[in-house]
Image: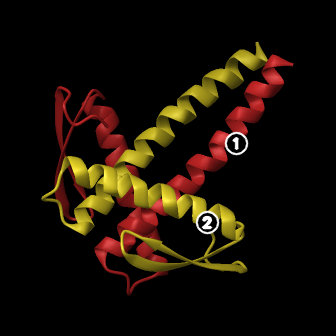
Chain colours: A red, B yellow
Amino acid sequence: MNLTEKNRTTVGIYGQQYTIIGTESTSHIREVASIVDAKMREIRSNNPSLDTSKLAVLTAVNTVNEYLKLKEQYELLIKNFNN
Amino acid sequence: MNLTEKNRTTVGIYGQQYTIIGTESTSHIREVASIVDAKMREIRSNNPSLDTSKLAVLTAVNTVNEYLKLKEQYELLIKNFNN
């Protein structure tokens, strides 16, 4: 998300307010925030002793992991598409 | 990442150690961790006053945002593939 662009959306994630500035629409930012919030609560339910910071790092780890898997599928699909 | 599976990998992210347990290979987990670490440092460089917890949440926000964009492209590609 580019922090120099126009839309300014305040969202609540895991009990904390964040103002996100970017080119994305407010509804998109709210969707992203609600996914992050839900993921943090899900990871928390499996690891109740984690503090917010570790919980957020593990949420990022989880999402990057899913991103890389999707990217692999995406590249495979492009490869098949071109053949 | 499934926390009940076999591989156990300890990685350093933003100066903190995390043990990730899952079905993914150690090299994959290390790649994921290094992406998260790099993202946190990148966001930090643009927002030096953020504490680790907010930094990690914004890293998760950033990653979910990229994931959703890729998912959109992926679904579009599948749609074109089927037509």
Query: Which residue is under mark 2?
Result: B29
Q: Tell me the element at label 1.
A: helix
What percent of the width, then of the height, locates residue A82?
Answer: 80, 18
Please state the total of marks drawn on the protein image. 2
What amino acid is at disc 1? Glu
Q: In screen coordinates, is B11 left or right of A44?
A: right
Instruction: Mark 2 and mark 1 in contact? Answer it, CB < 8 Å.
Output: no
Q: Callout 2: residue from which chain?
A: B
Question: Which residue is at the far right?
Answer: A83
Identify the disc placed on residue A72: 1
At 79% from the left and 27% from the top, the residue drawn is: A79
Number of other residues with Cα within 10 Å of mark 1, as a class: few under 14, some 14 to 19, many 20 or more: few
What percent of the width, then of the height, locates residue B83?
Answer: 76, 12
Question: Which residue is at the far top?
Answer: B83
At 21% from the left and 46% from the top, the residue drawn is: B46
Q: Which is more toward the observer, A45 or B67?
A: B67
At 74% from the left and 25% from the top, the residue drawn is: A78
Where residue A73 sits, quadrant-wise, is top right
Number of other residues with Cα within 10 Å of mark 2, as a class: few under 14, some 14 to 19, many 20 or more: many
What percent of the width, then of the height, locates residue B61?
Answer: 35, 49
What amino acid is at disc 2? Ile
* Quarter of the rendering occupied by the N terminus of chain B: bottom right
Identify the disc placed on residue B45: none
Same-chain status of marks 2 and 1: no
Q: Callout 1: residue from which chain?
A: A
